[in-house]
Amino acid sequence: MRRLFVAVLSSAGFKIIQAADGFVALETLKAQAIAAVVLDLHMPVLDCFALLDRLDDPPPVVVATADYAYDDDVARRRDKVFAFVHKPVLPELLVALVGKAVMAGQ
């Protein structure tokens, strides 16, 4: 799924930095200014919410998930999540959400 997201977003003109797991994503977010981030809800090492719990002020976050049972987690972290999208994601929707997230973070 990550490769598909990278292909879609790269072809739309976004500069992409990939992370193979939640820990690498966390370290990347701490080290670099990122305009927006797309996270899978269930990443290896650190899941999306464990990662977000370790960041005080993350960039706008789009969370992609195939899981429909996350309402309690969303409510607790509403301030750190820009949008949720269910997989499979239409490429046009992904591009639109990431574009809006980038604009929101400026």
Image: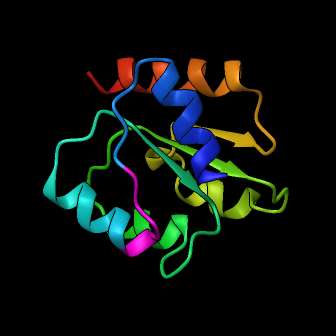
Q: Residue at x 33, y 41 (%)?
A: 59
Q: Position of residue 72 (x, y in %)?
A: 71, 63
Q: Find residue 44 and report its image quarter.
A: bottom right
Q: Find residue 28 and report its image quarter.
A: bottom left
Range of magenta residues = 18-23
User: Dividing the image into 4 quarters, which one contains the C terminus?
Assistant: top left
97 magenta-colored: no
21 magenta-colored: yes
Q: Which residue is drawn at 14% across and 58% down?
A: 31
Q: Where is residue 26 in the image (x, y as percent from the top left)?
A: 32, 66
Q: Is residue 9 above or below residue 13?
A: below
Q: With 63 as the anchor, is 54 left or right in this view? A: left
Q: Nearer the viewer, residue 91 or 23?
A: 91
Q: Is residue 3 above or below residue 46?
A: above
Q: Residue at x 38, y 36 (%)?
A: 36
Q: Which residue is drawn at 57% across and 69% down?
A: 43
